[in-house]
Image: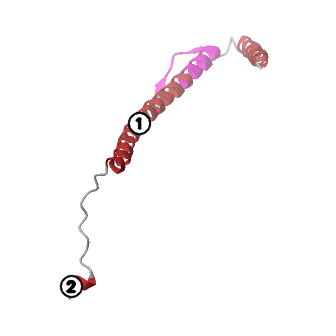
Amino acid sequence: MWILRWILLIIVLFFLVGFLSQNADQIVSVRIMGWTSPDLPLSYALFLAGLAGYALCLLVALINQIRLRTQIGTLRKQNRELQSELDRLRNFALEGEFPAVEAAPSEETRT
């Protein structure tokens, strides 16, 4: 399986180098929300766009990881509390100490 990944990576890199070499003389200017970049080769513009996309994906993944780790911590705390309560209830029956429960008055004692 790992060999297929390497073969696919080599093929993608081959096409990428071919694309960049054929468009090396193309000069572009990128405009984003009113900001205009200086003239730069198309390969640099595409590289920077890919880098920005990678950084954005990394940021989203990082935020998701923080959210999930916080949720895991909350669930672990809740699990510990429930386990503690379960242990108390199990030991409660073994110790023989039952809480005093007042019985509701029956019909016979009311009359």
The answer to whether one can see residue 30 in this image is no
Q: Is residue 55 above or below residue 22?
A: below
Under mark 2, the amino acid is Arg
Q: For residue 78, what is the image quadrant?
A: top left
Viewer-proximal residue, 53 or 20?
53
| Residue 93 shown left or right of residue 47 in the figure | left
Under mark 1, the amino acid is Arg
Q: CA distance from mark 1 to mark 2?
A: 50 Å
Q: Determine which residue is flagged by label 2.
A: 110
- Secondary structure category for the residue under label 2: helix
Residue furthest bottom as drawn: 111
* Magenta highlight on residue 46: yes
The image shows residue 110 at horizontal and vertical percentages of: 21, 85
The image shows residue 74 at horizontal and vertical percentages of: 38, 38
The image shows residue 94 at horizontal and vertical percentages of: 36, 47
Viewer-proximal residue, 4 or 74?
74
- Secondary structure category for the residue under label 1: helix
Residue at figure coordinates x 20%, y 89% from the top left: 111
Q: Which marked residue is nearer to the observer: mark 1 or mark 2?
A: 2
The image shows residue 98 at horizontal and vertical percentages of: 29, 55
Q: For residue 21, what is the image quadrant?
A: top right
Earlier in the chain: of badge 1 and badge 2, it is 1
* Magenta highlight on residue 47: yes
Residues shaded magenta = 34-53
The answer to whether one can see residue 110 in this image is yes
| Residue 92 shown left or right of residue 47 in the figure | left
Q: Is residue 54 above or below residue 24?
A: below
Mark carried by residue 76: 1
What secondary structure prevails in the magenta region?
Answer: helix
Residue at figure coordinates x 25%, y 85% from the top left: 108
